[in-house]
Amino acid sequence: MKLADAADALRVGEGVEKLPDFLKEIPVLDVAAAGTCGLLEASDDHDKGWSWQHSIAVDGGANVGGLVAGTVITAGWWPPRPSTSP
């Protein structure tokens, strides 16, 4: 399910139409899964003795980094295109 599909299901599609096209393609379930897994991993690390701040920074940071990388690739910003200037 993509952001545009979720917005239509929630009947807020008019506001989403103003977003750039690549943002409409964000997979909502992937973002939710990354957040859930980050919290589960942070909880496990906290149980092993890490502080909550450290656990969330490490596990949440890795998940956010993966989501940002996926957004960059989906948006077509990577790989950079060669320059055509002389």
Image: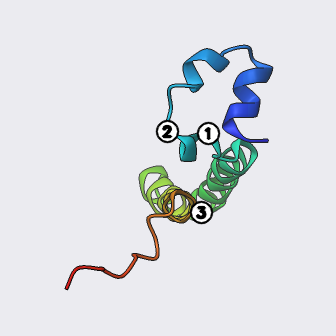
* Distance from the alpha carbon under mark 3 to that under mark 1: 34 Å
The residue located at (59%, 56%) in the rendering is 42
Mark sitting on residue 16: none
Mark 2 touches mark 3? (CB < 8 Å) = no
Mark 2: amino acid: Pro
Q: Find out whether the residues at labels 2 and 1 contact each other: C-beta distance under 8 Å.
A: yes
- In this rendering, the label closer to the viewer, 3 or 1: 1
Amino acid marked by disc 3:
Asp
SS type, badge 1? helix
The residue sitting at the bottom extreme is 86
Q: Which residue is mark 2?
A: 20
* Mark before the other along the chain sequence, 2 or 3: 2
Q: Secondary structure at mark 3?
A: helix
Residue at (79%, 41%) from the top-left corner?
1
Quarter of the image where one finds residue 11:
top right
Q: Residue at x 62, y 55 (%)?
A: 38
Query: Circle 2: is it few (<14), some (14-19), or many (20+) Cα within 10 Å?
Result: few
Q: Which residue is mark 3?
A: 45
